[in-house]
Image (cartoon, helix red, strand yellow):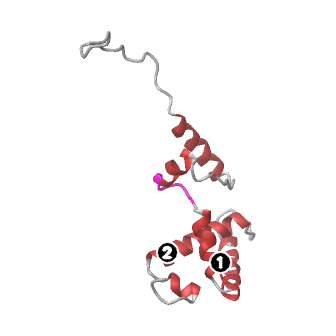
Amino acid sequence: MNSLSSTTSLPAPSAKIFDFTAAALSAHKKRQDAGVFEVLHASNPLVAAAKADPSMAVVDADWFLAIVDRIPEEKLQGLVDLMILVGSTLPGANGTTNANTVTWLLADFFRCAEREGQLHTLTGEPKGT
């Protein structure tokens, strides 16, 4: 038997263990609340933490761009124009809309269409593709 037996116990840590992911998520939330748009690598642990937090807005760029690529140009331009109009009416927008807001609004619109099984109406593809 080695020197660490089953009866050996370690003392409890004397200091609180710092959760770096929680601290990073808190800082990320503050930046997002201030209107900062951040692009994170998919392997960043902050992405998983943000996805698990219902108060966070997370857009998967690959998913988003795959949908954008499938929508006919005229229809996409109409959606962008609509989201610019909607974004300009949001509290604090003062009649203007930035690209980050348009991206979030489009992503939410795409998620809703996908959830309702209506994404095919945007892409013009047969239902189920």
Looking at the rendering, the stretch of residues picked out in magenta corresponds to 52-58
Residue, far left: 7
- Give whichever of 86, 1 is nearer the camera: 1
Mark 1 lies on residue: 69
Q: Quadrant of the N terminus?
A: top left
Residue 40: x percent and y percent? 63, 52
Q: Residue at x 48, y 76 (%)?
A: 114
Q: Secondary structure at mark 2?
A: helix
- 111 with respect to 72 (left or right): left
When asked about the image quadrant of residue 7, the answer is top left
Q: Residue at x 73, y 67 (%)?
A: 99
Q: Residues within 10 Å of mark 2 (few under 14, many from 20)?
A: few
Q: Residue at x 64, y 64 (%)?
A: 91
- Give whichever of 2, 35 is nearer the camera: 2
- 9 with respect to 125 (left or right): left
Residue 8: x percent and y percent? 29, 12
- Give whichever of 44, 107 is nearer the camera: 44
Q: Earlier in the sequence, mark 1 or mark 2?
A: 1
Residue, far front: 1
Type of amino acid under label 2? Cys
- Give whichever of 79, 35 is nearer the camera: 79
When asked about the image quadrant of residue 102, the answer is bottom right
- 9 with respect to 126 (left or right): left
